[in-house]
Amino acid sequence: MSRILIKQTLDNIDKEVTLAGHVATKRDHGKVTFIDLRDESGSLQIVGYKMLGELKMESVISVTGMVKKRPTGQINPHLITGELELEVKSYTLLSAAKDLPILVNDDGKQVSEEVRLQYRYLDLRRERMQKNIRLRHRLIRALRENFYQENFIEIETPLLTQATKEGARDFIVPSRLQPGEFYALPQSPQQYKQLLMASGFEKYFQVARCFRDEDLRADRLLELTQLDLEMAYVDKIEQVMDTVENLLKKSLTQIGGKLQQQVFPRFTYQQAMNKFGADRFDLRTTAEKKQGVLAFAWVTHFPFFKKVDKADAAEVADGKSGWTFTHNPFSAPLEEFRQDLLAGKNIANILTAQYDLVCNGYEVGGGSLRAHTRDTLTATYKIMGYSENEIEASVGHMLQAFDLGTPPHGGLALGIDRLAMVLTGETSVKEVVAFPTTGSGKVAVMTAPNQVKPQLLQELGINIKEREAK
Ligand code: ASP
């Protein structure tokens, strides 16, 4: 199909062109019908004499006609093409739309989440969602390009893998080739990125999908996207923090983000708790909130361990001794607490070499210097109550890699969904994800989770106990 984009009509005044797009609005006056035609680049009024009246909203058409200046008095100042219109000579109906279940020319905030997600391809047509998804794209693109420039290389890591702890429940996948056994989907690429440091790659990053089976909130997803990175030969938290701060500032500035401060303020966990009563906080003034300013800050000097919350199934499973990690079991302690960690003493007071990045009240990133020796990682697992055998089963492969020459290293993961959320000024991560799940974990547009055929279960060696009546 040879067509031009709607915004290109600006360069084609008094010429005949072909456009294609969705019917965004229609005003049918009998003899003459006005339609706003919408494509990726914008929208334009098209005028049909004794035609177009039959078209339903959101149908897809191509139209050929003359681009003309609108009569004065009919100019629409809100559109870049508002001084123009297309006088339609002929059109082709490419796809007829039936009555719409939801409207797409408002912000969609009145529509229930379930219906919006059921018809997500309609919902995504609205201007707000188009803006959000495109801004997310620009964020990822800018980050990628800036990381390449700093000589980070992009490496993919497996999704079918062994459990890696980030404090949530695992999603598991049954194996057909090893019946009765399961893969876990990664809660993060944590272990693989550390193994990449053992493999001689000194600066790694990846736009990684992570899976966490958690109860959902406005800032949480079952599958989330991280800009995951790791660097070898770092032994100070500032080395990673400075690198990330610079790359992030550069990327955000390039895509029009307004930063409150060029140097992100840094707080210890204790200072943050004393000052804000929380380790994530909002540094913006009321005026800055209205202006869409991004206020970043770092938090460091976190306790390494915390008492298990008995209501949290993942914590109960992770912390057999009653102690579990606050952030990541693969972190190193701050140097002055190394002896305490190794001796399993003074547990409540051991601080970890962890740093969290906060923006506008949300945690948008976190990372740490890592354990890169057998004794450190083993000591952490011992404090959590793991026996030698259990340690071997959980992280034996990491200990082996540490025994075979692994440089000191550290890294961080940026939460792309939350960053895109604060950047667009949205208050739910779902508004920046094309196809998020519903609050009860159902996928958008299709039906999942689903029951599977008995034959498939048999191949997997799985028996389902009688289903509870719904
Ligand atoms: N694994 C991340 C890290 O780099 C943290 C996270 O996934 O939340 O420390």
Image: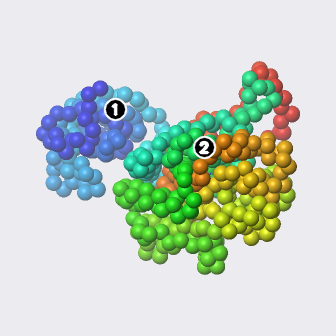
| Residue found at x 28% / y 29% | 91
| Residue found at x 58% / y 45% | 197
Q: Nearer the viewer, residue 222 or 100?
A: 222
Q: In the rendered image of this protein, does residue 190 appear above or below residue 237?
A: above
Residue where numbered disc 2 is placed: 198
Question: In what quadrant of the picture does the N terminus appear?
Answer: top left
- Which of discs 1 and 2 lies nearer the camera? The answer is 2
The image quarter in which residue 31 lies: top left
* SS class, disc 2: helix
**Sequence-first disc among 1 and 2:** 1
* Residue 163 in sight here: no
Left or right of residue 375, residue 246 in this image: left
The residue lying furthest to the bottom in this view is: 275
Give the image location of residue 129, x and y in percent.
45, 49
Give the image location of residue 298, x and y in percent.
54, 67
Q: Quick one: label 1, few (<14), some, or many (20+) residues within 10 Å?
A: some
Question: Which of the numbered marks, if any, corresponds to residue 221?
Answer: none
Q: Is mark 2 within 8 Å of ligand 1?
A: no
Question: Which of the numbered marks, if any, corresponds to residue 61?
Answer: 1
The amino acid sitting under disc 2 is Ala
* SS class, disc 1: strand
Question: In what quadrant of the picture does the C terminus appear?
Answer: top right
Give the image location of residue 159, x and y in percent.
63, 37
Q: In the rendered image of this protein, does residue 349 appear above or below residue 363?
A: below
The amino acid sitting under disc 1 is Ile
The image quarter in which residue 444 lies: top right
Q: Is mark 1 within 8 Å of ligand 1?
A: no
Q: In the rendered image of this protein, does residue 89 appear above or below residue 112?
A: above
